[in-house]
Image (cartoon, rainbow, N blue to C red):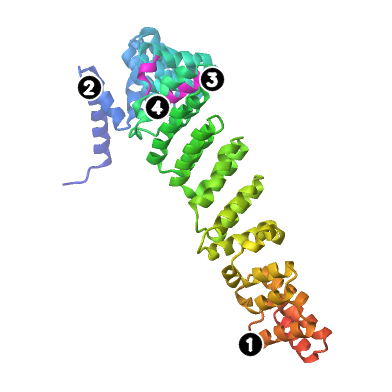
Amino acid sequence: MLAMTTPTRFLLRVLGLVAAASALMAPRADEWLAMLRDTHKQAEIVAMLEPRLAREGDNPTLLATLGRAHADLGNNARAIQLFERCIVLRPYDAETFAQLADLYRIAGEVTKQREALERAVALAPKLSWVAELAALLREQGEPLQELALLERHESDLTLQSGLRLRLAQLRAQEGQPERAIATLDRPDITETLSKSGRNDEERLLLATLLTETGRSGEAVRLGKRWIAQWQEPWLAGRLLTAVAPRAPAAEAAALADAVVELHPAIRFFLAKSLFERGARKTAYHLLRTWPLANPRPSMNELAGFLSACRNWGEPAIVWEAFARTLNESGAPKIIARYSEAIVAEYGLGALAPFWSRLPPEMLERRPLLGARLAFAEQNSRMALLLLERVDVGSLSGSDQQIWADLLSALAPSEAVFSTLDGLRRTGALPPGLLAQYARLAGSLGHEGEYRAVLAALRKAGR
């Protein structure tokens, strides 16, 4: 096949435009124009239709088609002129009013946008237009007008549009909580997770309203079902903090138990949030039941528990939990963890009421802690014996310093030096204790050791 020449292409283009002009006179012209729009040939539509306006300026179909083409091209001012002429001729065309509203919005003519939307909704209450008008009324700070609009179309409001939630919010805001509850009390909100859209906010608002109107038992019943369906700790937490401040203590506690059973990691966060919102009894309940739910806590978990109790003024919960642990047989490891955590959080003196009840096995497991307790009881011999059992290298930096200070307080300087020197020679003396060893060596006249350690410190940049 021979390639087309430029004149040939031009001729075909002219023939195409002639054919198009002829097509406009045919009965299926509207379908042909729609096809042009679908293929993004709006400029051709404009070029063909603008000349017809002089003789067909009262043709609403022509005005609407040309207006849409100009709008698609971004010629908003011209599109507005054409649509305004169209609605004079066709005042019941809801679609054109909606298109005009969109163009007014782009042009920043809010008053005209609202008027056009109101006409469109009055002629054909499409849900998207209702939503757009409601949003505009909300922006203009007219909640009563927005409420009236949504109530007129209540039967058409859907979950996924967000308008059912908005209607409930407005009714609650206007002092109509029971009507707001009725708006949300639907199976697609209360019973199941919606497939057509999330219903989380609707559920949270419903639970809040039920609690505020004295129906917290119903809120808790629904809430237990919802947290199991959600499987989301942040939603479960929001639900609890919405219900607990106004619910009776027993009902709030039941919901709290359901939340932390499913999401145990957020217990202390929830306690903090509840204290801040004034739900102190529920927060206390969460802290008080933590030891029962965690009979074998780690040191980090214990530290979080003690810190929460101290921060929110409930240390009695700690002593209650510790006393319960002391009464259990076969728990020296857990008793040791509690003891260390209590000392770290409250100081050594906090253990004084419990010293006589601490099992010997615990001291074996935590010889440094046992030495500190023995020292506090002025039992120097026992303290020294326990210090000898300490694996200094396994201690944290702060505990290594406690070990060295306690040894210095209990033993003669030469004995302390001998112990530290023995560790140094075997490479077991922690770096953090080198400076203390050097000072002690110098004060006792061990010049060689003193200089050797100073050289090592300089080399290490200490």
Q: Tell us which disc is closer to us: 4 or 3.
A: 3
Q: Earlier in the sequence, mark 2 or mark 3?
A: 2
Q: CA distance from mark 2 to mark 3?
A: 58 Å
Q: Amino acid at mark 4?
A: Ser
Q: Is residue 155 magenta?
A: yes
Question: For the residue carrying disc 1, how many other residues have a C-alpha within 10 Å: few (<14), some (14-19), or many (20+)?
Answer: few
Q: CA distance from mark 4 to mark 3?
A: 20 Å
Q: Secondary structure at mark 4?
A: loop
Question: Does residue 331 appear to the left or right of 345 in the view shown?
Answer: left
Q: What residue did someone put label 2 on?
A: 23
Residue located 28% across and 28% down the image: 36
Q: Which mark is residue 173?
A: 3
Residue located 77% across and 82% down the image: 438
Q: Which residues are magenta?
A: 153-172
Q: What residue did someone put label 1 on?
A: 426
Q: Earlier in the sequence, mark 1 or mark 3?
A: 3
Question: Does residue 198 appear to the left or right of 270 in the view shown?
Answer: left
Q: CA distance from mark 2 to mark 1?
A: 102 Å
Q: Tell us which disc is closer to us: 2 or 3.
A: 3
